[in-house]
Image: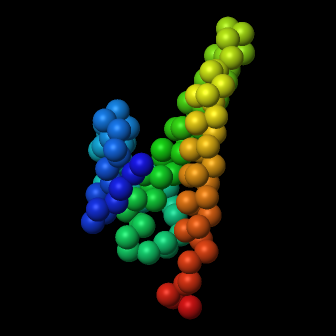
Amino acid sequence: MTMLIHNHIECDGALSDLILQAARQAIPGYVDRLITLPDSGRLNQPILPLLVGLIDATQQVAQAVADNAWDESIPLDRELMSDLARQSRAIATAIETASTCPDARA
């Protein structure tokens, strides 16, 4: 579970929190020259590059896991696969939910 407190995101898991904090530190102050995102509000503007970067990186890692499983012919544990897939669907739902709130700019 991830928590947002005054634009500071923390993860419950120690490893996840270390990765999240490292990812935040990896985003340079000139991020707007690296990625162009639509205006998504004052609170989301600074964390959207983090989300985009983490999802892009996660997709690459997931593909590497799939490739490695096939290369070695050792399937991913079914319970782990199920947990990761469930978490991925929850991420998609949260992102989709963010686009369905009323628009204060309208």
Q: How is the image coloured?
A: rainbow
Relative to 84, is 34 on the left or the right? left
Residue 36 screen position, x and y as percent = 51, 61
Q: What is the total number of numbered labels drawn onto the structure image?
A: 0
Q: Is any atom of residue 26 visible in this view?
A: no
Q: Quadrant of the C terminus?
A: bottom right
Q: Is residue 64 above or below residue 25?
A: above
Q: Residue at x 50, y 87 (%)?
A: 104
* Residue furthest front in the image: 79
Horizontal side, residue 104 vs residue 68: left or right: left
Residue 54 visible in the snapshot = yes
- Location of residue 90 in the rendering, given as x and y in whole percent from the top left corner: 58, 52
Q: Is residue 4 above or below residue 79?
A: below
Q: Residue furthest bottom?
A: 106
Q: Position of residue 18 (x, y in %)?
A: 31, 36
Kindly identify the residue that appears in the image at 63 percent across and 39 percent down. Answer: 85
| Residue 19 quadrant | top left
At x 62%, y 64%, the residue is 96
Write down the quadrant of residue 7 in the picture: bottom left
Question: 96 or 41, which is in the foreground?
Answer: 96
Q: Nearer the viewer, residue 12 or 101?
A: 12
User: Residue at 29% across / 57% down in the picture?
Assistant: 8
Q: Pick the residue in front: 3 or 9.
A: 3
